[in-house]
């Protein structure tokens, strides 16, 4: 998993391949539950790029991506958003999002 450290890196991180972006916050209980699901998924599929973005550290990215609630997952393919989901979901449902 990649934790976004610099706002300008966002576009390059999502620009190639399939990327799962997790918009979260440290204070969010469901975000912590879903983090466990994402860790398991990352261990199963080492080719999957997962980018975690703390909305409190990067509110501009959250605003540009219309994040209204967390956790929110967005799937990007070659820099284009193809699907999203808001709220806690299981690892199996995350896999469905990626298909």
Image (cartoon, helix red, strand yellow):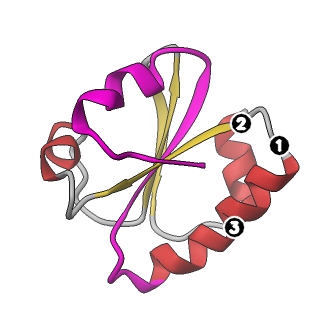
Residue occupying image coordinates x 74% and y 47% = 95
Query: What residue is shown with label 3?
Result: 37
C-alpha separation, residue under disc 2 versus residue under disc 1:
6 Å
Query: What residue is shown with label 2?
Result: 48
Looking at the image, can residue 36 be seen? yes
Q: Are marks 2 and 3 in contact (CB under 8 Å)?
A: no
Magenta highlight on residue 8: yes
C-alpha separation, residue under disc 2 versus residue under disc 3:
14 Å
| Residue 66: mark | none
Q: Residues within 10 Å of mark 2 (few under 14, many from 20)?
A: some
Q: Residues within 10 Å of mark 1 (few under 14, many from 20)?
A: few
Q: Quadrant of residue 90?
A: bottom right
Element type where label 1 sits in the image: loop
Q: Are marks 2 and 1 in contact (CB under 8 Å)?
A: yes
- The quadrant of the image that shows the C terminus is top right
Left or right side of 96 for 19: left
Name which of mark 2 and mark 3 comes first in the sequence: 3
Q: Quadrant of residue 37?
A: bottom right
Residue occupying image coordinates x 67% and y 72% = 36
Q: Which residues are magenta?
A: 1-29
Q: Quadrant of residue 56?
A: bottom left
| Residue 85 place in picture, x, y as percent | 48, 52
Left or right side of 97 for 3: left
């Amino acid at each position: 998993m990649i934790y976004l450290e610099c706002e300008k890196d966002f576009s390059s991180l999502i620009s190639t391949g399939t990327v799962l972006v997790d918009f979260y916050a440290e204070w969010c209980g469901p975000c912590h539950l879903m983090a466990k699901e994402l860790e398991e998924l990352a261990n199963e599929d080492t080719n999957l790029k997962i980018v975690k973005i703390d909305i409190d550290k990067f509110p501009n990215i959250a605003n540009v991506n219309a994040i209204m609630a967390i956790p929110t997952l967005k799937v990007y393919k070659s820099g284009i958003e193809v699907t999203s989901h808001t709220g806690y979901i299981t690892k199996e449902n995350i896999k469905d999002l990626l298909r």
